[in-house]
């Protein structure tokens, strides 16, 4: 440790260096390679189903559109998430015909799913406020 530099100052400098490195990495990260955490994808799906029932392709395209192409959800992530939500009782699925005449499984939110959205919104609000506070106040 350099003379005259306190431990707190050293840790702060290390924190700022880490923050700067993360900023550069995130800034230059390929948008196609950004992964969503499992819980985040579940929450986004539930939120989209709160407005209307949708089939899988529609869910993936809506997430991509609303996120300005930042989130591109592949089938390997989307359908396991839908099946997980169905198994938990948050969504129900029924076969129907799309606007283009194709048969597809449509997913709709259940009452349990509506309750889960409320819980998740509270969690994410608190989480994002905490992250913003740290970013603003350091």
Image (spheres, rainbow, N blue to C red):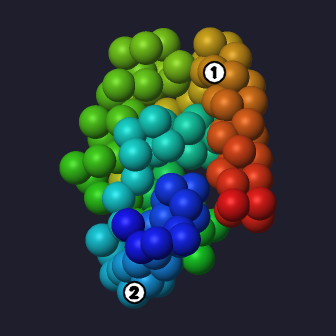
Q: Is residue 9 above or below residue 26?
A: above
What percent of the width, then of the height, locates residue 109? 60, 27
Q: Is residue 87 visible?
A: yes
Near-viewer residue (39 or 17): 17
Q: Is residue 71 above or below residue 131?
A: below
What percent of the width, then of the height, locates residue 43? 56, 38
Q: Quick one: label 2, few (<14), some, or many (20+) residues within 10 Å?
A: few
Q: Is residue 58 visible?
A: no
**Tags 1 and 2 touching, CB below 8 Å:** no
Quadrant occupied by the C terminus: bottom right
Q: Which residue is mark 2?
A: 28
What percent of the width, then of the height, locates residue 3? 46, 72
Q: Residue at x 35, y 59 (%)?
A: 35
Near-viewer residue (29 or 101): 29
Quadrant occupied by the N terminus: bottom left
Q: Residue at x 59, y 76 (%)?
A: 68
Near-viewer residue (86 or 134): 134
Near-viewer residue (13 or 29): 13
Dot 1 or dot 2, earlier in sequence: 2
Q: Residue at x 76, y 47 (%)?
A: 129
**Badge number at residue 47:** none
Q: Which residue is mark 1?
A: 116
Q: Quick one: label 1, few (<14), some, or many (20+) residues within 10 Å?
A: some
Residue furthest left in the image? 76
Q: Residue at x 30, y 71 (%)?
A: 33
Q: Quadrant of residue 31?
A: bottom left
Mark 1 or 2, closer to the camera: 2
Residue 78 lies left or right of residue 112; in this view the side is left
């Amino acid at each position: 440790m350099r003379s005259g530099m306190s431990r707190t100052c050293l840790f702060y400098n290390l924190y700022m260096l880490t923050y700067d490195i993360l900023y550069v990495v995130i800034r230059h990260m390929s948008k196609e390679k950004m992964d969503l955490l499992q819980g985040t994808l579940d929450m986004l799906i539930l939120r989209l189903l709160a407005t209307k029932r949708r089939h899988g392709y529609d869910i993936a395209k809506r997430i991509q559109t609303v996120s300005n192409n930042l989130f591109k959800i592949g089938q390997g992530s989307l359908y396991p998430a839908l099946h997980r939500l169905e198994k938990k009782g948050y969504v129900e699925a029924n076969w129907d015909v799309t606007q283009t005449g194709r048969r597809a499984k449509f997913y709709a939110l259940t009452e349990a799913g509506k309750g889960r959205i409320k819980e998740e919104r509270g969690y994410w609000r608190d989480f994002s406020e905490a992250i913003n506070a740290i970013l603003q106040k350091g």
